[in-house]
Image: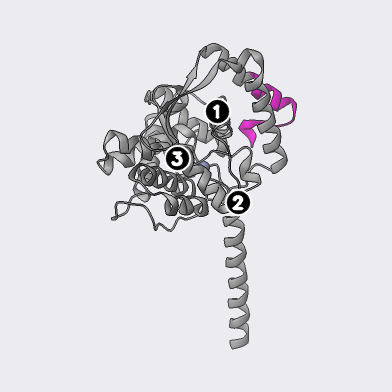
Amino acid sequence: MRKFNSIIKTCLGIGVFTACLSFSAESVLAWGGYSHWEMGQRISDKYNYSDNEKLNFSSGSLLADIGRLSWDRKYTSSDSEKFSDKMLSLASNSSAINFANGWKAHYIQDTSGALSNIDGGPSSYRVKCGWVDEYLRDHKNLNCPINNTCDAWVDYDLIKSTYDNLHNFNPSNKEIDREIKKMYVAFDLQLIANINGWSDSEIDGIENELNRTVGLCMNNNKYIRSVAPSYINLTDISDKDMDIINKTIEFHIDTVENLNSIKLNKAKSDTKNSYIINYSVEDKDKYENMLKKIDNDLKNKGIDISNL
Ligand SMILES: [Zn+2]
């Protein structure tokens, strides 16, 4: 009997270990960009942050998905615990610390927020992400950098030094800008398959889950350092498909007709190599057309965003 117990324990141990391994290796697309921004805003309000602190924090919460289409496959996912902890350790002024804490909050949102807690709506996880974003963007008229209704703030040096420290990789400001643009397009793309007309109970479900997740990002200390997230078990998009998505988005944002329709305007900010950025969509119809073209192109290549 004792031997049997120890075998069981060993099996359980291996099982738990394997589960941890497969979870930690997994990168999860848990929320859309509008949701990450909104949760950053709600957390900032609970902390009574100043406008500047709120901007720094929410920007970190939004931008942690940078590199999702490209660098994540080569390096540590930028929205992982490892990446955000490294960033926090390198942040040396208050703006940078707020930014890094927002980045860490994104990781907690991704790993602890459960869209499956929201009743109704689509069954596809990724469409559900777009569905919640659509609620925030169109029904709550959320101001968000992605739809150019407010600015974001980027600490380029902190992003670079985190990559450099972990991977000897030193992206230029220009490369970071390109990733931000692609990330914004990817979030808007996720909204293509949205569903309109929520019932009151569905809206309650969205609000409850947003607020529950915000609560998980808070602790008694001002800065988020130790939260044990429960991981979402979600099979991520394969490397091959992600490569196709990346290249298709790059192709479309680089075509002459779209080149000037989306721009990142920048204004120098307080600390070295940090900027207030403003994403301008010059022509909304043209932009939406581009998104539809990307979606169609992907479908022709066998990738249906709403079915991933
Ligand atoms: Zn993420």
- Judge depth for marks 2 and 1 and give the one in front: 2
> Foreground: 128 or 259?
259
Viewer can see residue 128: yes
**Residue sitting farthest toward the right:** 301
Residue 110 rendering spot, x and y as whole percentages: 48, 46
Locate the N terminus and report the quarter of the image it occupies.
Answer: bottom right
Q: Tell me, for residue 181, which label it has, or none.
A: 1
- Judge depth for marks 1 and 3 and give the one in front: 1
Residue 11 rendering spot, x and y as whole percentages: 63, 73
**Label 2 belongs to which residue?**
167
- Judge depth for marks 3 and 2 and give the one in front: 2
Which secondary structure, mark 2?
helix
Q: Earlier in the sequence, mark 2 or mark 1?
A: 2
Amino acid type, callout 1: Lys
Tell me which segment is drawn in magenta: 293-308
Question: Does the magenta-highlighted stretch encompass residue 212?
Answer: no
> Foreground: 179 or 47?
179
Please report the residue visible at 46 percent of the width from the left and 30 percent of the height from the top: 133
Amino acid type, callout 3: Ile
Q: Tell me, for residue 118, which label it has, or none.
A: 3
Which secondary structure, mark 3?
loop
Q: Earlier in the sequence, mark 1 or mark 3?
A: 3
What colour scheme has been applied to the protein in the rendered image? one colour
Question: Position of 136 compared to 32: left or right?
Answer: left
Which secondary structure, mark 1?
helix
Residue 268 rendering spot, x and y as whole percentages: 41, 29
Q: Earlier in the sequence, mark 3 or mark 2?
A: 3
Amino acid type, callout 2: His
Q: Is residue 4 above or below residue 240?
A: below
> Foreground: 199 or 246?
246
Q: Can you tell me whether the CB of the residue at mark 3 lies under 8 Å from the nearest atom of ligand 1?
A: no
